[in-house]
């Protein structure tokens, strides 16, 4: 099954309108058994941009595809040069109020699980446990030859040693950790190989055009089956990798609730879309439910 294609979706006039009343979300949290599905909008308040929102990077940036990465040494050099700079921003990012609220809901026993489409690790850094990273994590790298998995922080040190003085100024940062650099800026960058077998290293994330592992999809489907409701946070649901879980929940008669300022592809399957900022909304919900946010979240 092919996932994460570079497609676009345009909202239509017949979509149900959003609401500014978060009451249905509060009711679902009180009832418990809520499965959270989060998207890129969850991390924008941590300084990580999204793809499709206002100023989203798909307006100027075409993400690397799996086919391009595996077929071209030049593409890999470009990816690792841009990703090396982008990783510095990801490595400094800290959980925001929305991440802390989700973790607090989990500690209060209101959630049945968390699925994230994000690759930044901020849910875990905020204290959420058992997070399913649908698209993988930028915190890890994997060898395409031997399958060895390593730390992105360790790779960053190796890349710094191999590329002393590499300090170009990027035009922008994208949600996949890719910094906008020109071909001239990346021309002399040197990627490093796997330390185990000398093979090609890839970030342990699902690239556009790549398949989400079937076992991971099955685990997410099981979580939907076991949930009382599905709460979508900060996702446009443009691609099927997340939308399929919304449709699964709706088919099973489970309430789907969405918090996203802009219309989403899942609005027709939702009981309500709360069109308010995520951090403020989730903090307000936590306050109303008598739940305090843990400000001591660890750094990723």
Image: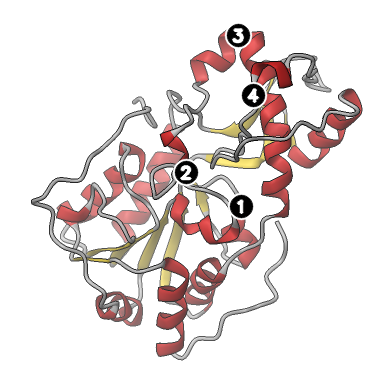
Q: Earlier in the sequence, mark 3 or mark 2?
A: 3
Q: Pinpoint residue 173: horizontal percent, then vertical percent.
A: 60, 40
Q: Pinpoint residue 52: horizontal percent, then vertical percent.
A: 39, 43
Q: Is residue 248 above or below residue 260?
A: above
Q: Residue at x 32, y 55 (%)?
A: 224
Q: Nearer the viewer, mark 3 or mark 1?
A: 3
Q: In terms of secondary structure, where does tag 1 sit?
A: loop
Q: Earlier in the sequence, mark 1 or mark 2?
A: 1
Residue 144 seen in render: no
* Quarter holding residue 165: top right
Q: Alpha carbon of mark 3 to alpha carbon of mark 2: how far?
A: 26 Å
Give the labeled residue for mark 1: 121
Q: Is residue 27 above or below residue 170?
A: below
Q: Nearer the viewer, mark 1 or mark 2?
A: 1
Q: In terms of secondary structure, where does tag 2 sit?
A: loop
Give the labeled residue for mark 2: 134
């Amino acid at each position: 099954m092919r996932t994460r294609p570079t497609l676009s979706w345009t909202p239509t006039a017949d979509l149900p309108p959003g609401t500014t009343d978060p009451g249905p979300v509060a009711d679902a949290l009180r009832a418990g058994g809520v499965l959270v599905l989060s998207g890129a909008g969850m991390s924008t308040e941590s300084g990580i941009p999204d793809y499709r929102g206002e100023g989203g990077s798909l307006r100027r940036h075409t993400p690397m595809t799996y086919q391009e990465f595996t077929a071209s040494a030049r593409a890999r050099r470009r990816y690792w040069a841009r990703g090396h700079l982008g990783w510095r921003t990801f490595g400094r990012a800290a959980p925001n109020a929305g991440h802390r609220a989700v973790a607090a809901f989990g500690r209060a026993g209101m959630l049945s699980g968390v699925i994230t489409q994000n690759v930044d690790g901020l849910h875990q850094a905020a204290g959420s446990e058992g997070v399913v990273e649908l698209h993988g994590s930028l915190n890890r790298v994997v060898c395409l030859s031997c399958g060895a998995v390593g730390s992105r922080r360790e790779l960053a040190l190796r890349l710094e040693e191999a590329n002393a003085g590499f300090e170009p100024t990027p035009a922008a940062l994208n949600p996949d950790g890719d910094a906008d650099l020109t071909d001239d800026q990346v021309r002399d960058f040197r990627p490093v190989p796997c330390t185990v077998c000398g093979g090609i290293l890839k970030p342990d994330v699902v690239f556009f055009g790549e398949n989400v592992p079937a076992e991971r999809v099955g685990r997410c489907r099981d979580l939907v089956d076991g949930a009382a409701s599905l709460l979508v946070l900060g996702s446009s649901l443009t691609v099927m990798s997340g939308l399929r879980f919304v449709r699964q929940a709706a088919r099973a008669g489970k309430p789907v609730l969405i918090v996203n300022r802009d219309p989403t592809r899942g609005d027709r399957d939702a009981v309500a879309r709360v069109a308010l900022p995520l951090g403020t909304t989730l903090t307000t919900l936590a306050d109303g439910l008598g739940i305090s946010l843990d400000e001591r979240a660890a750094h990723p």
